């Protein structure tokens, strides 16, 4: 079964740090790009970060650039999100999601086809 | 950045109704548009990719259309399990994905 399982969430004070993990199983993790997506309480989905299959290409949302670091360990089938200088507005459920690339008529289409159940991060004093 | 705007933000409908949700991009995104369904306390689920392709296992009552800046998600005959929040997402800009704000579909 294809599966993603997040962990590492919790309560942290403003300015603190947290490291999220996402364990992948049931597919060849090293062949897929991955994303982190978050959802603040009662709000919509916000894309946070992307990492290519090799880890050589990384993107961040402006809201987390300079504070969050995405990484992966293909040998361990794991994705990570190091979150520093946390703010109250970072409070959210954080999901990892597989990025599927479909080639069709010389175009590449990307979509997030597998999602974990999420891990909750609460930033509060 | 590409902005995605969904309408309506919320919608009340009855079982058996035909429902359409609209998503508009701030610039042309060709067919790089995906739709997700999310139920309370659950992770999002992919419904439609590349604007009109149905993800495996998704009922055929769901369909997507559009290209450029205007897209629609249609549910041909609402079922009780379809009451949820729906999000569009652009993948034209691979360096910065963006979601619409969501459309909450409620039972009338």
Image: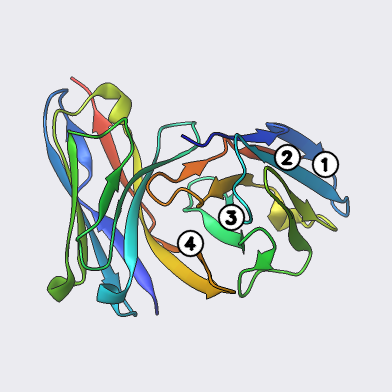
* C-alpha separation, residue under disc 4 versus residue under disc 3: 9 Å
* C-alpha separation, residue under disc 2 versus residue under disc 3: 21 Å
- Are there few (<14), some (14-19), or many (20+) residues within 10 Å of tag 2? some
User: Based on the displayed image, in which of its 4 quarters is residue A29 positioned?
Assistant: bottom left
State the mark number for residue B34.
3
Looking at the rendered image, the disc whose residue lies closer to the viewer, 1 or 4, is 4
Q: Is residue B67 above or below residue A84?
A: below
Along the polypeptide, which appears first: circle 2 or circle 3?
3
Image location of residue B25, percent across then percent down: 62, 39
User: Based on the displayed image, in which of its 4 quarters is residue A66 positioned?
Assistant: top left
Are the residues tagged 1 and 4 within 8 Å (C-beta)?
Answer: no
State the mark number for residue B26.
none
State the residue position of label 1: B13
Image location of residue A25, percent across then percent down: 29, 75
* C-alpha separation, residue under disc 1 versus residue under disc 4: 31 Å
Q: Residue at x 33, y 38 (%)?
A: A61
**Which chain does tag 3 point to?**
B
- Are there few (<14), some (14-19), or many (20+) residues within 10 Å of tag 3? many
State the mark number for residue A110.
4
Residue that lies at the very extreme toward the top in this rendered image: A125
> Which part of the image, by quadrant, shows the C terminus of chain B?
top right
């Amino acid at each position: 079964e294809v599966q993603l399982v997040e962990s590492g969430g919790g309560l942290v004070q403003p300015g603190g740090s947290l490291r999220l993990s996402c364990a992948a199983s049931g597919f060849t993790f090293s062949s897929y790009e991955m994303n982190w997506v978050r959802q603040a309480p009662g709000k919509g989905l916000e894309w946070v970060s992307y990492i290519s299959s090799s880890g050589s290409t990384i993107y961040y949302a402006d809201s987390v650039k300079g504070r969050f670091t995405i990484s992966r360990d293909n040998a361990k089938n794991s994705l990570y999100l190091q979150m520093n200088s946390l703010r109250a507005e970072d409070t959210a459920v954080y999901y990892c999601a597989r990025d599927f690339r479909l080639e069709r008529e010389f175009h590449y289409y990307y979509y997030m086809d597998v999602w974990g159940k999420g891990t909750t991060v609460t930033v509060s004093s | 950045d590409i902005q995605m705007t969904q309408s309506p933000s919320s919608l009340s409908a009855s079982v058996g109704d035909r429902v359409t949700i609209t998503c508009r991009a701030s610039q042309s995104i060709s067919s790089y548009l995906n739709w997700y369904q999310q139920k309370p306390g659950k992770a999002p689920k992919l419904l439609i990719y590349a604007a009109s392709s149905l993800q495996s296992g998704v009922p055929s009552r769901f369909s997507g259309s559009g290209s450029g800046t205007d897209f629609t998600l249609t549910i041909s005959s609402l079922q009780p399990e379809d009451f949820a929040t729906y999000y569009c997402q652009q993948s034209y800009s691979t360096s910065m994905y963006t979601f619409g704000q969501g459309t909450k579909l409620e039972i009338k």
